[in-house]
Image (spheres, grey):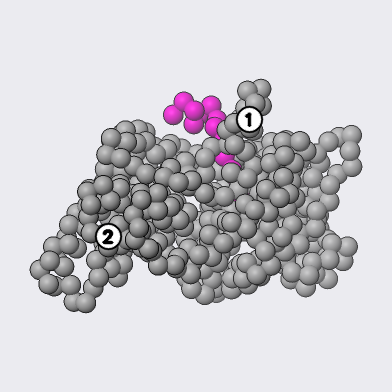
Amino acid sequence: RAGGGAGCLTSGALSSLVVKTLTTDESLASTPRATTLAQDEEMASLTHFCRGLRSIIVDEAETLAAGNQGGRTLLDPASVIPKIAQLKVDGEENLKLPKVKHPLWCAPFLSAAVEFELVQAVSTNAPPEVPAALVKLTEACADASLVHFDDAVRTRLTFQSLGTTLELPPLGRRTAVFNAMADELESRAESEDVRGCLQRDGFAVLPRALGSAHADSAADAVRRWLAHVGENAPSMLMPGTLDESGRSAPAVRDDVVAWLAGDELDEQFAEVGIVTQVLRRIVPSLASHPDDVAHDDARRALLPAASYLSHAMLSAYAPGCRGFARHYDRTGPDDPRRLTAVYYLNEHWDAKAHGGDLVLYTNPNKSPVHISPERDTLVLFWSDEVEHEVTAVSSNADAPRLAISVWCLGPTASTANA
């Protein structure tokens, strides 16, 4: 996905790197509002993590040289990850940034710092175990919700592009699951021409999006996570809202939602965070490429997934729920949502018996499109072009109707001028 050495940073590029990070607070409203960090804030964040990581590496090297490693290896995650986690805390306290809403806010800055160290290690002919340790450290950072899993994959690709002959160990379980899910999703989307369907019809339906094994493990993990949250943190489950004001109206919408950041990686339900990251980071590239967007169709332009942070929404319609009345997702010109993606988790769903269809109104001259929320089905549509609704869920349904939704963002007047 990174493509060769696309993620490499040279020392010259580092000084001019600007990582645009949009933070959203969907946990308070159904309509995300994006804010940007100013350029000096971005550079301060990047400098903080570059200097901090360099200090950690030097400290670890000195400890090893002094023979005080206590059996540790170079950049042993057991020693280094707590220090990097503290670096994140220090950044939140000392950088005086706008209130951070997303637990992975540090990911672009930390992953850039690691890749810079990686390039430096190879270019200065450091011992081969140094760049290998940096690659493995990035994966450990992904396991600790400090970077995204695709950052770990990209760092490995960067390492391979630098010409070293050192072999790396296989990917760890979580990163490997992410990579396999992402590969399957990209392959399926290409074979079904998802991009062409979106451009032509305004929507696309992708059955078997992740493959049955991944879909089953994700659905099982979501149910375990919901049970865990219901018992230990019920305030995370809230009525679905209508707009940024936080208003709810059960006659219009009566689901219960929880917001997923992609850091839900406890071993008992790690696939919740993994599938969230797959949808959040991979879907934008399936739908649109900058070269595909005509000058007269700029409304469909999408920001690169790595340029902003957002949550996914897990929704649950219990048996007997009314559903969600007909509506557009994008509520106005300052709403950054451009593309809606909905991934369904429901096993053995019978549309005729259980209801809960997603209904898309794509053309006033055509009949609406009814889509059954069957497990491993991914539906994409343009947020401001396709009006849609969720039909009532039958009281005879065996389980709640579950779906994970993500929104891919596009530029707005406010973000473009920030």
Residue at 37% from the left image edge and 44% from the top image edge = 8
Q: Is residue 327 above or below residue 298?
A: below
In the rendered image, is residue 279 in sight?
yes
> Could you tell me residue 268's position as x and y percent?
52, 75
Q: Which residue lies most toward the top here?
A: 296
Identify the secondary structure beneath mark 2.
loop
Question: As shown in the figure, which amino acid type bears the numbered disc 1?
Answer: Val
> Could you tell me residue 195's position as x and y percent?
68, 41
The local crowd at label 1, few if under 14, some if 14 to 19, many if 20 or more residues have their Cα within 10 Å, is some
Kindly identify which residue carries mark 1. 293
> Could you tell me residue 80's position as x and y percent?
27, 64
Q: Is 187 covered by the magenta stretch? A: no
Taking the image as shown, residue 92 lies to the left or right of residue 175, namely left
Kindly identify which residue carries mark 2. 128
Residue at 52% from the left image edge and 40% from the top image edge = 304
Q: Alpha carbon of mark 2 to alpha carbon of mark 1: how far?
A: 43 Å
Most foreground residue, 409 or 289 = 289
Q: Is 411 covered by the magenta stretch? A: yes
Identify the secondary structure beneath mark 1.
loop
Numbered range of the magenta stretch = 405-418
Q: Which residue lies most toward the left here?
A: 66
Residue at 54% from the left image edge and 37% from the top image edge = 303
Q: Are marks 2 and 1 in contact (CB under 8 Å)?
A: no
Question: As shown in the figure, which amino acid type bears the numbered disc 2?
Answer: Pro
